[in-house]
Image (tube, rainbow, N blue to C red):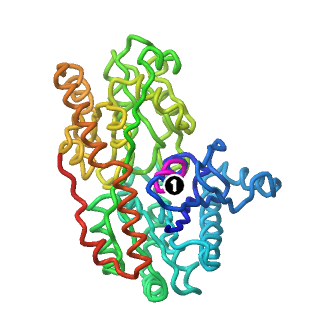
């Protein structure tokens, strides 16, 4: 049995990290692997890991240090420094555990933004085996405009840091040396991102990239719509739009609020908080666009047992991303799981997936009036058209099941252990309905 150490340094923050730390290791265990989760400081809200769990900072110990770290995370720049320290400490621990022979493969979720760290910490060793998932955050960095330097200073600082530090060509030599001594496979979540990583830094990773699309389970048991709206404290008879997930540099949340302002007969709920100071603040947007009585913001990390209430309460999910965003949006998977139709921006892989798999309607990216039109078109869909969209959701979760994701990960692990990734790289990553 393959022994996997699944590493998630940011599981104690909001966003997708605590979600995947909760569900992905369990999926791998269900596929027949021996999996242990490694986090820096546990999972947010003390969520159950569901598998064997190791923390860099032990639970109920070093309480003074934990309090200092918690204070440092309150402000953006100290938080970013903490993220670097936390990632470094977690990867050093992982590399040390592999050096002791306790694991066959190290699965890092995610390798970004500090993609160079896994190479640095394993450089003193030989034979370390890394499977690294990538959201493509560093190859699809935000496109800056002059007004952004005043309106979104931290996004600008983040983009500059990517260009000057993370994507610096000086790392090329470290990558070359590291991959001579150890084995790496990088796993972007869509084909566009995979191609960008094959081209990254002159093709340094070109023979070590395999597209591994995310998987989702089909357990879509939902409470009733009336019950869900009562639970969330929102109007029972309104047309409810859902915005879900942590705002980040690729999300165009403001377009949603602009559009809802123009749609007088709609109610917006947003679930999730911005953690890394790279996205718009929904609380501020609600006030700026005068939606005090037509929006409710749940400005915290939504735990797994609360998520069904949001998807059941809503009539449709809004997916609004920037023109530059070409990473995979996990919200497509979540919407398909709960059979909730989407209204999505039409750019890049997001728009292509919604159109290809018939998961909902599209609007012109970063265009609020186009979103208004899409909302109105959605309201006029027939019962038959809505049923077809929900049926497409079932087909989608079948094509991108969690079992298939686990099998692809296992194929990557076996390739790393055997020393050959040719067979793995040759496998098709396409899905057809």
> Quick check: 82 above or below 240?
below
Which is more toward the observer, 294 or 26?
26
**Residue for point 31% across, 43% down:** 397
The answer, for residue 165, to whether it is visible in the render is: yes
Q: Main secondary structure of the magenta part?
A: helix
Magenta-colored span? 21-29
Whole-percent x and y of residue 229? 46, 18
Could you say which quadrant of the image residue 88 lies in?
Answer: bottom right
**Residue for point 29% across, 78% down:** 422
> Quick check: 245 above or below 429?
above
| 334 sits to left or right of 36 | left
Mark 1 sits on what residue?
25
> Quick check: 127 above or below 302?
below
Whole-percent x and y of residue 363? 23, 37
Judge whether residue 78 is colored magenta.
no
Which is more toward the observer, 333 or 159?
333
Which is more toward the observer, 24 or 295?
24
Could you say which quadrant of the image residue 52 lies in?
Answer: bottom right
Which is more toward the observer, 85 or 265?
85
SS of the residue at dot 1?
Answer: helix
Judge whether residue 22 is colored magenta.
yes
| 25 sits to left or right of 361 | right
Quarter that holds the C terminus: top left
**Residue for point 50% across, 67% down:** 1
């Amino acid at each position: 049995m393959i022994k996997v150490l699944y590493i998630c340094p940011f599981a104690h923050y909001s966003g997708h990290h605590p979600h995947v730390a909760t569900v992905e290791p369990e999926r791998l265990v269900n596929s027949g692997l021996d999996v242990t989760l490694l986090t820096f400081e546990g999972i947010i809200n003390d969520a159950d890991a569901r598998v064997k769990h190791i923390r860099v900072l032990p639970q109920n110990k070093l309480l003074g240090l934990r309090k200092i770290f918690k204070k440092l995370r309150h402000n953006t720049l100290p938080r970013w420094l903490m993220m670097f320290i936390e990632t470094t400490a977690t990867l050093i621990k992982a590399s040390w555990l592999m050096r002791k022979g306790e694991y066959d493969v190290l699965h890092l979720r995610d390798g970004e933004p500090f993609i160079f760290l896994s190479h640095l910490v394993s450089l003193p060793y030989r034979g370390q085996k890394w499977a690294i998932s990538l959201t493509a955050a560093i190859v699809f960095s935000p496109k800056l405009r002059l007004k952004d330097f005043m309106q979104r200073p931290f996004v600008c600082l983040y983009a500059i840091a990517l260009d000057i530090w993370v994507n610096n060509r000086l790392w090329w030599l470290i990558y070359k040396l590291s991959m001579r001594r150890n084995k790496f496979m990088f796993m972007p979540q869509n084909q566009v991102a995979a191609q960008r990583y094959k081209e990254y830094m002159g093709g340094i990773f070109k023979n070590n990239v395999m597209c591994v699309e995310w998987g989702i389970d089909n357990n879509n048991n939902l409470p009733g719509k009336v019950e869900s709206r009562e639970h969330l404290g929102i109007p029972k008879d309104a047309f409810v739009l859902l915005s879900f997930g942590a705002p980040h540099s690729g999300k165009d949340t403001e377009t949603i609020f602009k559009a809802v302002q123009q749609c007088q007969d709609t109610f917006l709920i947003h679930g999730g908080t911005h953690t890394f100071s790279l996205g718009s603040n929904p609380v501020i947007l609600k006030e700026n666009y005068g939606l005090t009585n037509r929006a409710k913001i749940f400005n915290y990390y939504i735990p797994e047992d609360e998520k069904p209430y949001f998807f059941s309460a809503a009539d449709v999910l809004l997916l609004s991303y920037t023109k530059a965003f070409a990473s995979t949006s996990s919200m497509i998977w979540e919407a398909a799981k709960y059979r909730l139709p989407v209204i999505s921006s039409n750019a890049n892989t997001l728009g292509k997936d919604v159109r290809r798999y018939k998961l909902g309607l599209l609007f012109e990216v970063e265009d609020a009036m186009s979103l208004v039109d899409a909302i109105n078109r959605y309201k006029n869909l027939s019962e038959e058209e809505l049923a077809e969209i929900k049926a497409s959701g079932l087909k989608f979760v079948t094509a991108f099941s969690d079992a298939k994701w686990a099998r692809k990960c296992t194929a990557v692990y076996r390739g790393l252990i055997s020393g050959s990734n040719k067979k793995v790289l040759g496998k098709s990553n396409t899905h057809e309905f």
